[in-house]
């Protein structure tokens, strides 16, 4: 079976080579020991075949790989014959690829940026404001719904109910308020977790709470205290302050790896800037400021995916 497959594969290669052979191509005997095929006068060397076999790894046969190399060279010959390789867009794409690969190779050979602990400490001190944390408060709320379209009498009834629940809460303790929240609150996401609001800063409303509620929490003097019943268009809130967190600064140990990454990136950018400076050194580079000023800036339209019929 293997002999039959190899015979068929060699036959396929013979067909490919024959179909791509042009006048003037030497016979197989004249190719030489280091050439496995010729396409339009361009040799495919044994070294090239071995390199491609190594790149593809196990499972690739010599015959299949050689067939791919022949098809590649045949297509490349047509590219050159039609002048497609001189198309401005293609030339630009190739040049961009060459520049990118060359820059990648040159910068890869440079030593990896090293960031010392002292540099991290210095950056931490110099940019302490970046690592500051604002003061925060945390509370618990009990919410009673009252539609904005409700009659004044109906809203008054809900308000009286809220007043009574606030009085019951003040007369009890944290456990009492937790029970009242579970039994009466109509804010379903927080009802069974004690009405927890999460941490709230003065300038940021986390969790989408009504701004009036957050403001009321900040106005409570100390944890355990209550705000007066808070009225909003959607209903009434009873708010209890549970915790206060003073403003501070994150410790160096907590942010050191972030600073290390930032400094390493900055050093990589410095290496890139120095590389570009070396590339420009000694070259005659001039800028036509008039032409530059007259060049219109065309906004790139958002690309939309093609419509599938």
Image: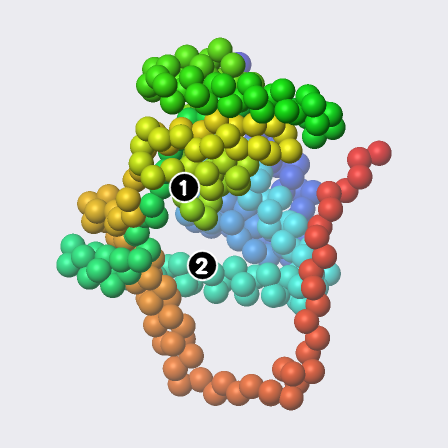
Q: Which of 30/69 is in front?
A: 69
Quarter-wise, where is residue 118 in the image?
A: bottom left
- Residue at 60 percent of width and 34 percent of height: 232
- Going from N to C along the chain, the mark reached first, 2 or 1, is 2
Q: How many marks can you see?
A: 2
- Residue at 57 percent of width and 21 percent of height: 160
Residue 152 seen in the figure: yes
Residue position for label 1:
219
Q: Mark 2 or mark 1: which is in front? A: 1
Residue 261 seen in the figure: no
Q: Is residue 103 above or below residue 177?
A: below
Dot 1 lies on which element?
helix
Q: Position of residue 130 (x, y in %)?
A: 33, 55
Dot 2 lies on which element?
helix
Q: Residues within 10 Å of mark 1 (few under 14, many from 20)?
A: few
Q: Which of 299/221 is in front?
A: 221
- Residue at 36 percent of width and 76 percent of height: 278
Cα–Cα gap, marks 2 and 1? 61 Å
Q: Position of residue 273 (x, y in %)?
A: 38, 70
Residue position for label 2:
101
Q: Which mark is residue 31?
A: none
Q: Residues within 10 Å of mark 2 (few under 14, many from 20)?
A: few
């Amino acid at each position: 079976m293997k002999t039959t497959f190899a015979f068929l594969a060699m036959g396929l290669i013979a067909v490919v080579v024959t179909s791509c052979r042009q006048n003037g191509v030497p016979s197989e005997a004249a190719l030489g020991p280091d050439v496995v095929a010729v396409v339009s006068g361009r040799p495919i060397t044994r070294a090239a075949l071995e390199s491609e076999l190594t790149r593809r790894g196990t499972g690739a046969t010599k015959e299949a790989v050689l067939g791919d190399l022949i098809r590649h060279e045949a297509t490349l010959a047509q590219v050159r014959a039609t002048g497609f390789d001189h198309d401005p867009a293609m030339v630009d794409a190739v040049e961009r690829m060459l520049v990118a690969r060359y820059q990648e190779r040159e910068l890869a050979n440079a030593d990896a940026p090293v960031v010392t602990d002292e540099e991290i400490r210095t950056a931490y001190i110099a940019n302490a404001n970046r690592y500051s944390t604002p003061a925060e408060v945390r509370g618990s709320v009990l919410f009673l719904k009252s539609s904005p379209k409700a009659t004044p009498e109906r809203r008054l009834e809900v308000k009286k109910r809220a007043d009574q629940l606030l009085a019951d809460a003040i007369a009890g303790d944290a456990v009492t308020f937790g029970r009242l929240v579970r039994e009466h609150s109509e804010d379903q996401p927080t009802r069974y977790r004690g009405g927890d609001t999460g941490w709230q800063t003065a300038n940021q409303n986390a969790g989408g709470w009504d701004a009036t509620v957050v403001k009321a929490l900040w106005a409570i003097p100390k944890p355990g205290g209550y705000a007066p019943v808070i009225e909003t268009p959607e209903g009434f809130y009873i708010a209890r302050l549970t915790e206060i967190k003073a403003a501070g600064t994150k410790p160096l140990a907590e942010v050191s790896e972030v600073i290390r990454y930032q400094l390493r990136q900055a050093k990589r950018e410095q290496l890139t800037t120095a590389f570009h400076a070396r590339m420009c050194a000694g070259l005659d580079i001039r800028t036509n400021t008039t032409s530059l000023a007259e060049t219109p800036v065309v906004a790139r339209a958002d690309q939309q995916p093609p419509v599938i019929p």
